[in-house]
């Protein structure tokens, strides 16, 4: 149990376009999901906390108008990278926790490459 | 806010030897400490976790110890195998659903056959 999926696994887009990444909790409901960014050989950097039915909470330095987060249901959160630039190229990972539990389960990640 | 430090950043051991990775945290309110293993290009996988009301937890070759007073916790892998080679991350949290994890900087473990 506690499976989190992400789609797509890899995406290549042109500079200036927008990309949407989906994060789904497959067998549990997640009122909170987290979005991370990870550069090569570095730790996970929390970008934002996504709460179902309300606005996301962004970490300092993360542009909320560039990284749009929507958490419309208890099983789905989306991250849209708007007007992507090559420096947005990275590995994006989501995580979610089950109700009443401390554990977080990670999605498989999305490798974004902006050309 | 919470600050988690992790050492060493890289670790090489001979197959069969033990590996130890250490983390310290700053916020005494943290009470949940998971360890994740991440292989290249893949998701972090939870390998063991511990709550602050427990001093040690073991699962086969993997164990975690926690010293609340000193605010540090460690991952111990015994009888290492080549498939243990990966990056390991520690984290700290207040342990409630929806509370963020504060991650360490990671340790790249290489087990030499």
Image: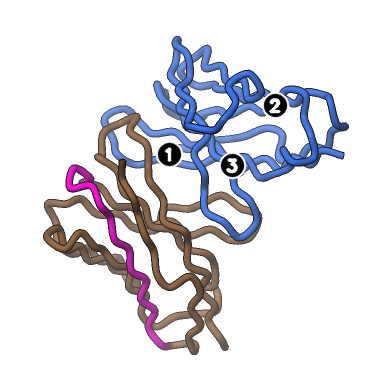
Screen quadrant of the N terminus of chain A: top left
Residue B86 placed where, x, y %? Answer: 54, 67
Q: CA distance from mark 1 to mark 2?
A: 30 Å
Q: Earlier in the sequence, mark 3 or mark 1?
A: 1
Q: Which x, y percent locates residue B50? A: 24, 54
Which numbered disc, 2 or 3, marks the residue that appears first in the sequence? 3
Say which chain tag 1 marks: A
Where's residue A3, x and y in %?
49, 38
Crowding at label 2, few (<14), some or many (≥20) Cα neighbours within 10 Å? many
Q: Nearer the viewer, residue A66 or A108?
A: A66
**Chain of the residue that carries numbered disc 2 in the rendered image:** A
Is residue A5 left or right of A8 when viewed as pictured? Answer: left
Is residue B61 one of those drawn in magenta? no
Look at mark 2 in the image and give the residue it sits on. A81
Local SS, label 1? loop
Q: Quadrant of the C terminus of chain A?
A: top right
Most foreground residue, A83 or A31:
A83
Residue A43, above or below A87: below
Pair 3/1: label in front:
3
Q: Residue furthest front?
A: A61
Q: Are marks 3 and 1 on the same chain?
A: yes
Q: Residues within 10 Å of mark 1 (few under 14, many from 20)?
A: few
Q: Which residue is mark 3?
A: A37
Residue drawn 56% across and 86% down? B112
Chain letter, brown: B
Q: CA distance from mark 3 to mark 1?
A: 25 Å
Q: Look at mark 1 in the image and give the residue it sits on.
A: A1
Q: Which disc, if any, is residue A88? A: none
């Amino acid at each position: 149990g506690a499976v989190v999926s992400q789609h797509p696994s890899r995406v290549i887009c042109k500079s200036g376009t927008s990309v949407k990444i989906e994060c789904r909790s497959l067998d549990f409901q997640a009122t909170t999901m987290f979005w991370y960014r990870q550069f090569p050989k570095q730790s996970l950097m929390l970008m934002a906390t996504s709460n179902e039915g309300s606005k996301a909470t962004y970490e300092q330095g993360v542009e909320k108008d560039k990284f749009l987060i929507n958490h419309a249901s208890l099983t789905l959160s989306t991250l849209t990278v708007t007007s992507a630039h090559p420096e947005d190229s990275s590995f994006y990972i989501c995580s979610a926790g089950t109700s009443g539990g401390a554990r977080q389960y990670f999605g498989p990640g999305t490798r974004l490459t902006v050309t | 806010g919470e600050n988690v430090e992790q050492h060493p950043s890289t670790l090489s051991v001979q197959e069969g030897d033990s590996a130890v990775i250490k983390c310290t945290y700053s916020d005494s309110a943290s009470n949940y400490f998971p360890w994740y293993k991440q292989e290249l290009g893949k998701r972090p996988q939870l390998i063991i976790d511990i709550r602050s009301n427990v001093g040690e937890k073991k699962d086969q070759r993997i164990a975690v110890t926690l010293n609340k007073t000193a605010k540090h916790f460690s991952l111990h892998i015994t009888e290492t195998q080549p498939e243990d080679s990966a990056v390991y991350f520690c984290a700290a949290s207040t342990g409630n659903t929806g509370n963020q994890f504060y991650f360490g900087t990671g340790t790249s473990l290489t087990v030499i056959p």
